[in-house]
Amino acid sequence: MNPLSPRLAEIVNALPIRPGMRVLEIGCGPGAAARAIAARLGTGHILAIDRCGKAIAQAREHAAAEIASGRMSLRQVKAEELVLLPGEQPFDLAFGIRVGALDGRHPEAGRMALARIAAVLRPGGRLFVDGGDPLREVLLPRWLDGVG
């Protein structure tokens, strides 16, 4: 398994991850960042999502140990269609790297994605995207809190 690229390692290290957190990665690709975060979560959990079935299949192949441990799960879903499954707890933190719906390339999808992300974050949950140094926090408008 390949180590993280320097850029991805910088991003993962910049996230305010603490053991026991519930983390959501939007647009996980082959799952390298999710695996690195799973290793830091202890009893926590990361859900890695991607709209692409091929990416989810690659992530599943590379993350068998993390999935078996219960620290990581995968789901094929668009961010703008994401909902909590029955019994699923909200997330403390979400992040997305090179996600068109979150970086301004697809504004309408972005509005829908932000509403869905706000709905799956716990009150006070935080969203980070690339484009900062190396990340920037997206402040979700108060009107998005509790959209469900």
Image (cartoon, rainbow, N blue to C red):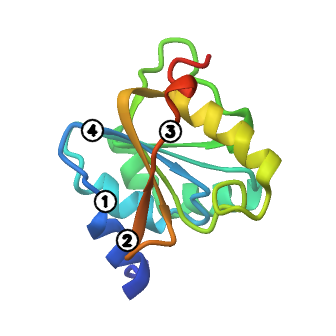
Q: Earlier in the sequence, mark 2 or mark 3?
A: 2
Relative to 76, does residue 120 appear above or below in the rendering? above
| Mark 4: amino acid | Met
Relative to 120, does residue 87 appear above or below in the rendering? above
**Residue 99, image quadrant:** bottom right
Q: How far apart are the alpha carbons under marks 4 and 2?
A: 17 Å
**Crowding near the residue tagged with mark 1, few <14, some 14–19, many ≥20 C-alpha atoms within 10 Å:** some
| Mark 2: amino acid | Ile
Relative to 81, does residue 34 appear above or below in the rendering? below
Badge nearest the viewer, 2 or 3 = 3
Q: Earlier in the sequence, mark 4 or mark 2?
A: 2
Q: Position of residue 83 (x, y in %)?
A: 63, 25
Mark carried by residue 57: none
Q: Are marks 3 and 4 in contact (CB under 8 Å)?
A: no
Q: Are marks 1 and 2 in contact (CB under 8 Å)?
A: yes
Q: How far apart are the alpha carbons under marks 1 and 2?
A: 7 Å
**Residue 1, image quadrant:** bottom left
Q: Which residue is mark 1?
A: 15
Please give the name of the residue rendered at 78% of the width and 53% of the height, measured from the top-left corner.
107
In the picture provided, is 16 more to the left or to the right than 23? left
Q: Which residue is mark 3?
A: 140
* In front of the other: 68 or 98: 98
Please give the name of the residue rendered at 46% of the width and 68% of the height, measured from the top-left corner.
32
Q: Is residue 51 visible?
A: yes
In the picture provided, is 79 more to the left or to the right than 23? right
| Mark 1: amino acid | Leu
Q: Earlier in the sequence, mark 1 or mark 4?
A: 1
Q: Earlier in the sequence, mark 3 or mark 1?
A: 1
Mark carried by residue 11: 2
Q: Which residue is mark 4?
A: 21
